[in-house]
């Protein structure tokens, strides 16, 4: 996944590197087989299925306003959710690493819950909370004590909330180990050299965290793009407004149109791949710029 | 779904090995898989117990009946992909047709094999409203009054929702003297009053009953009564519109699977028992309209079904599923058109 030249000094590549540990052929063969069975063959199958569709139909499906709107909702909401997660995930990781307080281990375990919870359960729980009659939904509704008239569930905002929920652990768990490696001396050194607090954060801490934050961002983003189970319960699924692309895929499948479903899936895959590739390039740049952490 | 299919396939394998082992024993123990749609869960739980008892009494054999429930279209897809169903009892004729067409597991003329177009029970679509009916909703036209929010699932992903849509269409057709443009306008206005399009009937029920969203739920008759049982009759009222749709959820034996499992006779007997006095009575008890009301042993059960005008999918207005499905719900069909942005 990482395309960065981690050791730029060794330009060019050699197929077999001299190593004290034997077994290159075996492990390389295993890697190829494993990746093929689990990842490559299903994806090739997907594109073969999509290739059965005549080109003009692919273009028609891809450029239909409803498809474009669904892709916009899917990728837009995932992007916003991942952005929110890197801000608050970073704070959560910071608190968990830097402070000792009662219940810290419990809170640490809670972070993993979105991994373990069936996404449908998460979706139902969130939509119950954020629906106009739910605890939080009522607080911010026109009838609530705050008179805000905010609608969260059954709008794109609801989708973002669900995606923040499922993406949170990715950011926390990638940033946390890097933070644990941080020496407090670095910050002290920055302070003795005359840096104020903001300078310490923005010029010493954040740059070193950058690669980990970007990894967390791309993991959370990729996970959110493919999410279905939790989103359908809170989205409202109104075409052109709060309908995500995976719902369109399910609709195609209900019509027994597997090829049409594969076309939309293929479009999503290509967009996601391009976005992840760009993020990887930024990451590689960040590593060169701020050093490997 | 795939894993379920695998587990079931392994289960079927184990069962058939077990079966081979006890072939010499006096009583055979068989397993039957009934693949059905969401709202029939309670119906078949009760019916399976009754049938197992009946089968044991008449043949001396014991039978274990497994049920699988899910969205009707998804269930059909699972059977096409290899879920080893002995019988299918789905929401739509079209879904069963798809199995015949795509997987060839039984004849395309399966509808003629059992009585009443292979429909042992029927149902209809009714309104479930908040207690006291505060928005005064009594007919389909009331659904598009200002300030009324309607809860119904997406007809593209839910079999039940297609009946909701067609019932609304039928009403509009009568009210507007058969003007199709006005029907489309009505349907468009109706879905403009829908704040949430859930993907399945149960999802909509939860949205309406538990999350208290919307003023009226378009629901299967049996599902509406289930909500009364589940969430309390003092919170909701069932409203019967003067006219609605005759929903005919059909059943059939999946011949090739049943032959492979050696359950062909059992599967046929299972479906036929749905038409027996006991089967019809259990259907009525679970708020499905029996296809043979005379067979119901307790006439009081029948009084729970008010007589309303029911229009069939085979009416010339719709021309059967084969015509109605692509016209209304196909790719680019009327339902897609009402959600296509103008301009």
Image (cartoon, rainbow, N blue to C red):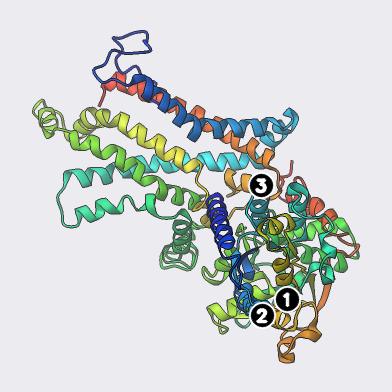
Using the numbered discs, state the Cα–Cα distance from disc 1 to disc 3 in whole angstroms.
33 Å
Mark 1 or mark 2, which is nearer the start of the sequence? 2
Asked if disc 3 and disc 2 are in contact, CB closer than 8 Å, the reply is no
Tag shown at residue A6? none
Provide residue B290's location: percent of width, then percent of height: 76, 79
Side (left or right) of B9 relative to B113? left
Whether residue A99 is visible, yes or no, is yes
Quadrant housing the C terminus of chain A: top left
Of helix, strand and loop, which one carries label 3?
A: helix
Between B313 and A217, which is closer to the camera in this rendering?
B313
| Chain letter of disc 1 in the image | B
* Label total for image: 3
Name the residue carrying label 2: B54
Q: Residues under labels 3 and 2: Cα distance?
A: 39 Å
Residue B218, image x, y percentages: 68, 69
Q: Residue at x 28, y 9 (%)?
A: A9
B37 is higher (above) or lower (below) than A194: below
Q: Is residue B179 left or right of residue B333?
A: right
Q: Which residue is mark 3?
A: A253
Marks 2 and 1 in Cβ contact (< 8 Å): yes
Label 1 CA crowd tier, 10 Å (few <14, some 14–19, many 20+): some
Q: Is residue A135 left or right of residue B138?
A: left
In this rendering, do the residues under marks 1 and 3 share a single chain?
Answer: no
Going 71% across and 86% down the picture, which residue do you hit? B304
Q: Which mark is residue B273?
A: 1
Quick one: SS at disc 1?
helix
Q: Is residue B329 visible?
A: no
Task: Name the foreground residue: A82 vs B135.
Answer: A82
């Amino acid at each position: 996944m990482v395309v960065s030249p981690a050791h730029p000094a060794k330009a060019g590549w050699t197929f077999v590197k001299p190593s004290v540990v034997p077994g290159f052929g075996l492990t390389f063969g295993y890697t190829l087989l494993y990746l093929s069975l689990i990842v490559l063959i299903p994806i090739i199958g997907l594109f073969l299925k999509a290739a059965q569709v005549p080109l003009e139909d692919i273009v028609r499906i891809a450029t239909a306003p409803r498809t474009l709107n669904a892709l916009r909702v899917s990728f837009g909401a995932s992007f916003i959710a991942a952005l929110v997660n890197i801000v608050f995930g970073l704070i959560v990781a910071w608190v968990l690493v830097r402070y000792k307080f009662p219940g810290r281990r419990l809170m640490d375990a809670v972070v993993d819950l979105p991994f373990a919870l069936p996404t449908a359960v998460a979706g139902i729980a969130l939509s119950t909370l954020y629906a106009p009659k739910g605890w939080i939904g009522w607080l911010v509704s026109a009838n609530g004590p705050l008179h805000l008239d905010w609608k969260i569930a059954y709008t794109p905002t609801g989708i973002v909330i669900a995606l923040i929920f499922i993406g949170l652990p990715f950011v926390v768990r990638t940033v946390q180990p890097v933070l644990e490696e941080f020496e407090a001396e670095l910050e002290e050194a920055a302070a003795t050299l005359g840096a104020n607090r903001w300078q310490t954060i923005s010029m010493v801490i954040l740059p070193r965290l950058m690669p980990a934050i970007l990894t967390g961002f791309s993991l959370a983003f990729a996970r959110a793009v493919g999410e279905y189970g939790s989103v359908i319960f809170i989205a409202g699924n109104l075409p052109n407004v709060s309908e995500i692309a995976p719902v369109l895929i399910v609709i195609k499948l209900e019509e027994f149109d597997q090829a049409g479903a594969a076309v939309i899936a293929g479009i999503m895959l290509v967009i996601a791949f391009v976005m992840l590739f760009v993020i990887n390039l930024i990451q590689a740049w960040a590593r060169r710029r701020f050093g490997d952490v | 779904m795939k894993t379920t299919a695998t587990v079931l396939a392994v289960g079927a394998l184990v069962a058939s090995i077990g079966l081979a082992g006890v072939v010499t024993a006096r009583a055979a123990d068989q397993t039957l898989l009934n693949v059905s749609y969401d709202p029939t869960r309670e119906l078949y739980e009760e019916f399976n117990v009754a049938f197992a008892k009946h089968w044991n009494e008449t043949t001396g054999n014991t039978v274990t009946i497994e049920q699988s429930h899910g969205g009707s279209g998804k269930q059909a897809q699972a059977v096409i992909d290899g879920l080893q169903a002995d019988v299918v009892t789905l929401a739509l004729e079209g879904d069963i047709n798809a199995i015949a067409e795509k997987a060839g597991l039984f004849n395309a003329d399966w509808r003629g094999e059992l009585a009443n177009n292979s429909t042992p029970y029927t149902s209809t679509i009714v309104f479930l409203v908040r207690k006291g009916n505060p928005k005064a909703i009594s007919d389909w036209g009331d659904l598009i009054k200002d300030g009324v929010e309607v809860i119904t699932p997406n007809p593209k992903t839910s079999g039940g929702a297609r009946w909701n849509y067609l019932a609304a269409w039928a009403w509009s057709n009568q009210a507007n003297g058969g003007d199709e443009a006005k029907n489309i306008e009505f349907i468009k206005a109706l879905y403009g009053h829908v704040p949430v399009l859930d993907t399945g009937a149960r999802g909509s029920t939860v949205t309406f009953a538990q999350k208290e969203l919307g003023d009226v739920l378009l629901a299967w008759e049996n599902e509406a009564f289930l909500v009364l049982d589940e969430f309390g009759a003092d919170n909701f009222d069932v409203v019967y519109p003067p006219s609605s749709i005759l929903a005919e959820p059909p059943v059939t034996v999946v011949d090739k699977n049943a032959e492979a499992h050696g359950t062909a006779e059992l599967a046929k007997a299972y479906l036929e028992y749905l038409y027996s006095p006991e089967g019809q009575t259990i259907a009525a008890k679970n708020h499905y309209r029996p296809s043979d009301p005379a067979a119901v042993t307790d006439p009081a059960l029948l009084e729970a079904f008010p007589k309303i005008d029911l229009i069939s999918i085979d009416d010339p207005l719709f021309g059967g599923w084969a015509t109605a499905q692509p016209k209304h719900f196909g790719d680019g069909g009327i339902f897609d058109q009402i959600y296509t942005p103008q301009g």
